[in-house]
Image: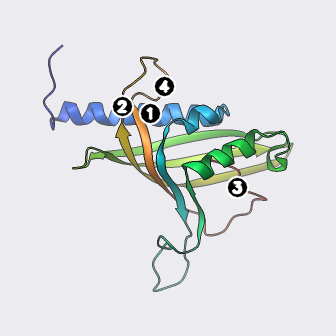
Amino acid sequence: MTAVEPGTRLDRMLLSWSVEQFYFHEATLLDERRLREWLALWDPEARYWAPTRVNREGSPDVTVPGQLGVFEDNHLTLALRVASMEAKSAWAEIPPSRTRRLISNVQVSESDDGTVSAGSNFIVYRSRLESVEHWFVGRRSDRLERVEPTGRTDDGAGWRIRERMVLLDHASFRTDNISVLF
């Protein structure tokens, strides 16, 4: 196999493919409710947040950090969310929702600090009980870092999430809860 020079088209394609495979693996973990495995994809200093959309003329489209958002988590609060979703008393998830995540339009660029900036669009379909269905649509902006793969083919392919900003296209929600991870 020929070595790939950094910065070549093939190198960029391999980087994009690797991040896409990571995102597909992550979506599978969430859809299969393998939440502990999903949590292991996150850096211990991670930030996971979603600003609120603003619908006022002349205003920015989204709130800025420090203003009220849909959620703002770190690794500890993500772990608490996972524990809550796994608890048998989690009323918002009894019975558990069925979800399907579609990830597309993945765009990747390397940063000077050795991390990778990646953006992706998503659609999350959630079905609950007999007749409750919800759709969540938006864009994710991530900062990923390389980690040593464990050798397993399904372990996240050498990436860890340091930061994720979820920009939901919804200005308001018609759901009884947002017990969904993006």
Q: Residue at x 59, y 40 (%)?
A: 101
The x, y position of residue 182, in whole percent, is 57, 48
Q: Mark 1 or 4 closer to N-term?
A: 1
Question: Which residue is nearer to you in this view: 167 or 57?
Answer: 167
Q: What is the secondary structure assignment of the residue under circle 1?
A: helix
Q: What is the secondary structure assignment of the residue under circle 3?
A: loop
> Which amino acid does the dot numbered 3 rest on?
Ile
Residue behind mark 2: 18
Q: How crowded is the residue under tag 1: few (<14 C-alpha within 10 Å), some, or many (20+)?
A: many
Q: Mark 4 or 3 closer to N-term?
A: 4
Residue behind mark 3: 178
Separation of residues labelled 1 and 2 (CA atoms): 6 Å
Separation of residues labelled 1 and 4 (CA atoms): 9 Å
> Which residue occupies the extreme top position in the image?
1
Separation of residues labelled 3 and 1 (CA atoms): 24 Å
For the residues bearing labels 1 and 2, Cβ distance under 8 angstroms: yes
Q: Which quadrant of the figure has residue 150? A: top left
> Which amino acid does the dot numbered 1 rest on?
Phe
Residue 42 versus residue 53 in the image, above or below: above
Question: Which residue is nearer to you in this view: 100 or 23?
Answer: 23
Separation of residues labelled 4 and 2 (CA atoms): 12 Å
Residue behind mark 4: 155
Q: Is residue 7 left or right of residue 90?
A: left
Q: Mark 2 or 3 closer to N-term?
A: 2
